[in-house]
Image (cartoon, grey):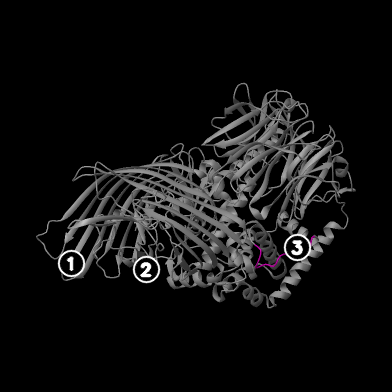
Amino acid sequence: MKAQEFFPTQRKIEKTRIQYEKQSWKYINNENFEIYYFGKNENLAKNTLQILEKDFSRMTQLLGYTPYQKVKVFVYPSQDDLFQSNSGISFSNSLEIKINNLERFKIEIAFKNDLKQFKNELLTSLASVYVNDMLYSGSVKDVLQNSLFLNVSDWFIKGICSYAALGETSEMNQFMFSAIQNNKIRKLTVAKGKEADMLGQSIWNYIVKMYGASSVSNILNLTRIIKNEQSSVASTLKKPFGKFLQDWFKYYYNQNSFVTQNVVNPERFKTIAHVDLANSKNISELQLSPDGKYAVFSIQNQSKFDCYLVTNGSNKKQLFFSQNLNDPMSLESLVGPKFAWGAGNTLYVLNAAEGKTFLNTYAPLVSSKGNLKLTNKRELKDLNVLSIEASASQPKLLMKVLRNGQVELGIFDLRRNRFNAIASEASNKTIGHWEKEGKNILFVGSTIIDTTSISTKNESQFGLYFYDVEEGKSNLVYKLKADVKDFYWKSDSTIHFFVNNRLGKSLLVANLNNQQLKEKMLNVGNWDAFQWGVSESLVRKTDLLEQQIVWVPNEELLKGNEVNFISDISDMPEVIIGSENSDLDSTTNSLILKRNLEKKARLERNMSQKAKNSTGGKQGAQIYENSLVLNPLKGTFVSDPIRGLGYSLQANMNDLMENHLIRGGIYLSSNLKNTNWWGEYNYLENRMDWSIRYDRKVLNQENDYTSSQKIRFNRVELKALYPFDLRNKLVVSSTYAENRAIDQINFRTPDNVMGYAGLKTEYQLENVNQIDENLEEGQRAWASVEFQKATRTTGGYAKFLLDFRKYIKIKDFLFFNSRISLSHIQAVGGFSTTPQTIMGGMDNWLFQTHVGRTTANPLGTEGLANRDVFMSDFAGPLRGFGINKLSGNSHFLVNLELHLPVKQLIGNGQERSQFINNLQLVGFTDIGAAWTGNSPFSRNNGFNTNEYGGKTNPFKASVTDFRNPFLIGLGVGARTKILGYYVKVDYAYGFEDLSVLPAMTYLSFGRDF
């Protein structure tokens, strides 16, 4: 059933994605995975398959799990490409998309910053698929029971997914150290988001270290059976859960004491900005100007990035650039604008939008006021840029790009618009900087030549290279065994490395003369990034869920003793190979290159054989061919305002890319005589979306032996949707509808038939973030103009409609929703049977009551509905009154609601019951009016002016009674989920012309407006 016709509060904005260019998809596979890619990204697809295969055995053994179907992985070379995908477009929100992907063994991932981040996100997604299958799959009975009764806490699910994918990480350890130092370890059942992720990962890490890896699968399988994660942990480890948590805390407390006992804490911080990570905010990028006077940074708030300029010594921030990515999938990590400072404090800002990459250039900063002025904007064609750094002496940029599925470090000449690669990311991230004069380049990269693209070991064997731009040669300067995040060339003999280690971050000092590597005994474990300045450095650090940017005097970085650096990476064979142009021994280079080529050949032969075995003889990349997938049937109870309670069943089919959607459904009322049939096809492969739809509705009315009729409504609609962006859309539709009223008593009575040919134009706005079930933040709106031409008589009618909704998050436990709806229908060409808007009651109201009216009743005055009743509109909730309390050619309605989610009041995750976790308490008021003719504020109008007499009566009088034209409803209610249905209960009083009507109770299905 098409909900928006009779249920305006349930109406959803048309979903769309913008395709800037058409993609041809291919895939490679083996017995465990299918990797889908498009364009020249076969290398990226092969790398993805190797990453997954490398960790497949380790992950499945840890989980004690054997998958029975392949995981489908859709790889996108950039975030912008992922946003163009139609995947999940048939679902109402990002949460439903994620659940569907998990159930279908489907992963969608975009390459963002570097190979390490890509790998971490990929493995975490794979672990999520496997864990979800372990806990929630099985027979139909098991699936139903687990969906209703298995409601585990966030720390349990998020934690095991992170640990299975990443194991023990420095970020996790540093979070625990900060939590212990600040004595801010929250109760597990209350933790959510990143906090739940870190706490859960640390718990699973502790379990494996203390009780062995076999405990993981035992706990997961027992949780599936007894539906309680705390009891599962206690039973498996044979220890009360409270005592287990005490031991877990002591373990990390002792580690924290060991780390901090000999280090010096930097002090004298000057905070520039800080955000709360729990509120979906993040400081995503920062850059310090060459002279150390200015800093730029961006703050991410969900999918919006605001970029600021700040002057050293001042806390005043200037907003100079903003971008909203309009993320349709609510991804956990997003990539925003990138910055680079050039000569004379020229600022470059790189951003991706509308399928293109742009480089914005701002005039050099020479004034102490620090005002930025945009001077140039150019498109960087055919470049997927990951990072940039500007030269201090020439118009060139050092860029890291993803090209043909492989990461490359190179130089972009701003004058010639040309990119030349100097190094490729074979097995690890490549980090590069211009040397101080801005003529040559220093970069850190893998010291292992691995032509297979993804190395199976030696993932932290790095070398520092010097690249001579004029000669085009690179030489190995220094090698180290560490996971380098960044480095700084302090002098010709000294380099500072900023590295990850098992317990956090470290600052290393390398002496090029004697090849010694020292570690500063400085507590920088919670630093995410830092940049050296002339006298003060810029640091981004994270304490628990608070992220800050601070100025740090350089003297603070010189504190503490220096000790010999001991790598916490296991011993690896010291095979050091320079570039092709390095000065290392060419014979050794050739031997190792030959060995790696043989290794690559073996891997490719194995992959080809696996593909051959799993695809019936097909080898290599294969062209994707459309194949339809039948989605599970969706059924729900529907209380039609005209035909009463019934059941609606919907079937959906689509291809894997969801470029083609086929939908169909049926509604059957309780008397089995009133039905709906509908079907539609959507073509979504290009920017403009097309759809065609057919509806058939039947209303059968039998009042007595003297009056009985059947109304048949048939309509065909052709619709085109053009998105200006993901928020703003224009919809144009053409329809033909026919209404036929049949007298079922006197068959000689000719059918009452009317056809309408219509054209409708509608503007749609949606800027809404889904926070939780029935809780949103943002705004959405519809504004439409429609004309319907009667085909069997002259004239027709025109209709205008406006519906605006605003959702405000006041606190975590308090939300305010408002809605304004108004419409007007105007007869054209003397047409007399225009449809009306009906007000009163609620959408999908189970035990509905109708108000019987003797005049101007669109539902009929003698128990039989009007012929065009299916073209009437229902305005939405006007609680305190029955359906059809008011009607007219015009209407005005305001709905105001306050929502209090109970789980935020008692603590998130405290209850296992879906009933409690989804329970919301609501206070509301509805104010509305409907009329025909003059405005209800005029002295004589169709609302309060009635004609008496006339016809056979020789006397005729017009009586005006100056009533309040507005009806007001006031009350309270509750919402929750029961057996998978979202149920609302409302108790309201109606106020009519200063009179208080008896209270009414409403039981209804569906979410609020």
Which circle, 2 or 3, is nearer the viewer? 2
Q: Which residues are magenta?
A: 182-191
Q: Earlier in the sequence, mark 1 or mark 3?
A: 3
Residue at numbered disc 2: 848
Q: Could you tell whether 978 is left or right of 812 in the image?
A: left
Which circle, 1 or 3, is nearer the viewer? 1
Q: Earlier in the sequence, mark 2 or mark 1?
A: 1
Q: Mark 1 Cα within 10 Å, few/some/many (few <14, many 20+)? A: some
Q: Residue furthest top?
A: 415
Q: Main structural element of the magenta stretch: helix, strand or loop?
A: loop
Which three-letter amino acid code belongs to the residue tagged 1?
Answer: Ser
Find out whether the residues at labels 1 and 3 contact each other: C-beta distance under 8 Å: no
Which three-letter amino acid code belongs to the residue tagged 3?
Answer: Lys
Residue at numbered disc 1: 707
Q: Secondary structure at mark 1?
A: strand
Q: CA distance from mark 1 to mark 3?
A: 74 Å
Please tell me in which quadrant of the rendered image residue 958 appears.
bottom left
Q: CA distance from mark 2 to mark 1?
A: 23 Å
Quadrant of the rendering where the N terminus is positioned: bottom left
- Residue at screen point 55% across, 39% down: 405
- In the rendered image, the vertical position of residue 293 relative to residue 845, given as above or below: above
Q: Residue 590: percent from the left, percent from the top?
A: 66, 36
Q: Residue 845: percent from the left, percent from the top?
A: 40, 66
Q: Residue furthest left?
A: 748
Q: Secondary structure at mark 3?
A: loop
Q: Could you tell whether 881 is left or right of 526 in the image?
A: left
Q: Secondary structure at mark 2?
A: loop
Which three-letter amino acid code belongs to the residue tagged 2?
Answer: Gln
Q: Residue 592: percent from the left, percent from the top?
A: 66, 40
Residue at numbered disc 3: 184
Q: Could you tell whether 380 is left or right of 389 in the image?
A: left
